[in-house]
Each structure stands twice: as structure tokens, then as C-alpha cells.
Amino acid sequence: MGLFDSINISASGLTAQRLRMDVISNNIANAQSTRSAEDPNLPYQRQRAVFASAQAEGSFADVFQQQMQAPGGGVRVQAVEKDTETPFKLVYDPSHPDAVKDPNDPLYGYVRMPNVDIVSEMVDMISASRGYEANVTAVNASKGMALKALEIGR
């Protein structure tokens, strides 16, 4: 393990948590958007960042050998995916321009709202913020250890 490996691993965590906070802030900003850019008939869909190990490529034996030779590798954002599991919220507001206008539709007068829950988004943001702070603390600790090691050589 090299001198800067721990800093590189923490830096990858910082980057991943920053992107996660960007995704969360985008969700909060679009919590009331009844039209999405992809499909104007559907509301905004919540997004989430999916993390993966930075070196998790190949079979188990290949990954095991990589970890034995050079442990650690940090984290990377594998994808930013839409939350298709959580249903859209329905709000009855017949005067809304995006309300269902067909009187034969059982959802007549209802507006499909995004599947974004502000409370859970705020909890996720606090979690991402704490993860970011933990990585900053790890970088500072690694930097402090490297400085102490240099002082020994004096």
C-alpha cells in the first residue's frame, strides 16, 4: 500500500458523496414538478446514486487477487437510476392543468405528483453530508500521519 492510497480512496468517497448530494438536491428541487423532460405526461421521478467498489471487475478470483496485490480502491458511482418502485403521489385538484381531464377515467381530477418524499431526501442528505465529513477527516488523518513520518526523518 502506497503513501497516497488512503488519500486516493478518501478522495473517491468525497467525489461519490458530492454527486449523491447533487442528486438529492435535484430531487428536492423537482418535488413539485408535474411534468418531466423525458415524458411531459409523467411527473418527475426520484433519482438515486448507486455506488460500487472501484476495483470490482471480473470474477471473484480476479477481484480477490487484485485486493491481495493492491488493497483498497475506493468507491465509484456505478449509475444514477430512477426510482421506479415508489409510486407517484395522487392529489385531487381538478383545476390543475395537469389533472386527468377524461371523465371516464377513474383518476378524473387527480394530478400525478413526483414520488419524492422531502423528509427521506433530507435524511439522505444528512447521511451524505456525514459521509463527506468522514472522508474529509480520513484525508486529514492521512495527511497528519504523512507529516509526522516526515518529521521522524529530521
Image: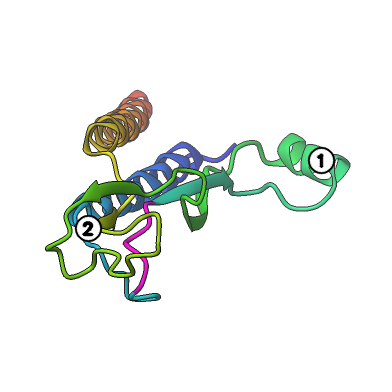
Q: Which residue is drawn at 32% across and 53% down?
A: 23
Q: Which quadrant is home to the N terminus?
A: top right
Q: Does the magenta stretch include residue 44?
A: yes
Residue drawn 72% across the image and 38% down it: 67
Asked whether residue 97 is drawn in magenta, I would say no
Left or right of 80 in this view: 32: left
Q: Mark 1 points at which residue?
A: 65
Q: Residue furthest left?
A: 95
Secondary structure under the numbered disc 1 in the rendered image = helix
Residue extending furthest front?
Answer: 104
The residue type indicated by label 2 comes to Asn
Whether 132 is drawn above or below 114: the answer is above
Query: Quadrant location of residue 121?
Result: top left
Q: Is residue 71 left or right of residue 151?
A: right
**The magenta stretch spans which residues?**
41-46
Above-or-below relation of 112 to 13:
below
